[in-house]
Image (cartoon, grey):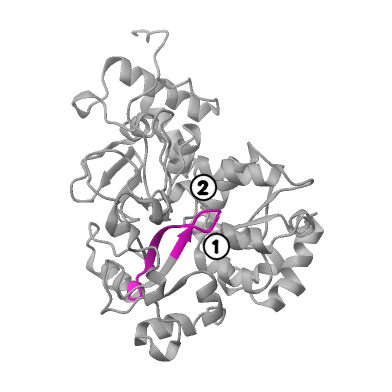
Amino acid sequence: MAQRNRGYIDVDSLQQELIAGGEIVERIASFYNVSLPALHQTQNETRMACIFACGKEQETGDRALSIKAKQDGAVFRCFQYGCTVRGNLLNLMYLMKHNSEPADGKLKGREFKEIASDLQALVAGRTPEPKAETPSTRQSPATESMDDESPLLNIPLKDSENERARELVNLDEQFITDVADMSPQAAAYVRKRPFMTSEFMEKFRCGYLPSNAKGLLRGHFVYGYPDADGKVLTWFGRNLNYEDQHKKWQLSGDSSKEPQKFKFVKGFHRGQELFGEPQFRELATPEQLQQIGIILVEGPNDVINLHTLGIPALAVCSNTVTETQTDKLASMANSIPGGHVSVMLDLDREGENGSKQTILELAKRCCVRLAWTTNLLDGQFRNRQPESVTAEDWDTMLLPALMHIS
């Protein structure tokens, strides 16, 4: 019987072992230290926004990339128009590592050996070899990297070189904050959120931008995104028809045109910022932060609701954190005696997956803990979001739980 080469790696067996262990996307991303966008998972498929630099001209929907695990391997494909990535598990690993496809789209020679070696290390639980530098950088809705020579920067609208952008500084002057004057969809959106009073809409510079207004965000519920000094960096809108559109999309089976919940202006790097910084700094006290930590949530409504309860919080506008956001949070936490970050992402599947990634990243830089879990108090908060937390929830259940952890 012919003997195998000393350096032979049984790639087929390793792939089957990796797939049998489950969570292949998360494990590959963790192995290469790649931050993932929201994951939408079924028994045999994982969906997410495409994070690869592969020819697409704009951000994809959050289910554009499909990864399917099969008994004999895994295959992935992006359904976004203009996106070209597809392949097997080894191709996926190569893309995660280099953010570019191999020459001719196939792994050969040295590239194949490199990824085969990584697969062996991944299955064995070892860390990867340092990867070679590549000219490309990863940019996606949930994860944006920075090039040392050309960092991604968000400039306040008032300082923009674009005259039209400067004209948007006071866009909130056109907002409607009285429910009686809103469209039926906008009024329903606000009424479902009792914390969204006119007072707090003005404080957070958000409100309904009527359909007869100018701009791409007309007809949306619009939020201002300020920097730490309160200067507006951009405006972003909540699609008020998202729920109905998403149901129709799911029934249609059209993977390439998934409706988006939020619309961000092109060119804004949300992964570089934390939403709610000015209000956080206004409300938070050192004693409070020592007690409950820096509460980290997903979206703007979570921040606003907690603020109405007297709880300072910051949002990543995603369910995962970027390196820049993590560095900012760690710097804030480490500047407080006994400081830490309390992760309070949504208690659904996507939020729990994001919490794992977020805690792992923060733990490298500062003290971190979970503010709540699906099992807390016999699952009373399962599938809840911070925007649904009431004063009674906080005072009688969540605060005592946080105090107990302390």
Q: Are marks 2 and 1 in contact (CB under 8 Å)?
A: no
Q: Is residue 290 visible?
A: yes
Circle 2: element type: loop
CA–CA distance in space, label 2 to label 1:
14 Å
Identity of the residue drawn at 55% across and 29% down: 125
Q: Is residue 383 visible?
A: no
Question: Please, what is the three-letter code of the amino acid marked with disc 1?
Answer: Asp
Identify the magenta region: 224-242
Question: Please, what is the three-letter code of the amino acid marked with disc 2?
Answer: Val
Around disc 1, counting alpha carbons within 10 Å, would you say few (fewer than 14), some (14 to 19), or many (20 or more)? many
Judge left or right: residue 155 versus residue 217. Answer: right
The residue carrying mark 2 is: 321
Q: Which mark is residue 176?
A: none
Identity of the residue drawn at 37% across and 67% down: 237
Q: Position of residue 392 (x, y in %)?
A: 71, 78
Quadrant where the N terminus is found in the figure: top left
Q: Position of residue 324 (x, y in %)?
A: 51, 41
Identity of the residue drawn at 43% across and 80% down: 189
Judge left or right: residue 99 versus residue 26. Answer: left
Task: Return the residue nearer the eye: 238 or 11.
Answer: 238
Q: Quadrant of residue 2?
A: top left
Q: Which mark is residue 346?
A: 1
Quadrant where the C terminus is found in the figure: bottom right
> Which one is earlier in the sequence, the residue at label 2 or at label 1?
2
Q: Quadrant of residue 179?
A: bottom left
Task: Return the residue nearer the eye: 378 or 203.
Answer: 203
Judge left or right: residue 205 versus residue 361. Answer: left
Camera-side mark, 2 or 1? 2
Q: Establish if 340 lies above or below 173.
A: above
Q: Position of residue 246 (x, y in %)?
A: 32, 69
Identity of the residue drawn at 48% across and 85% down: 191
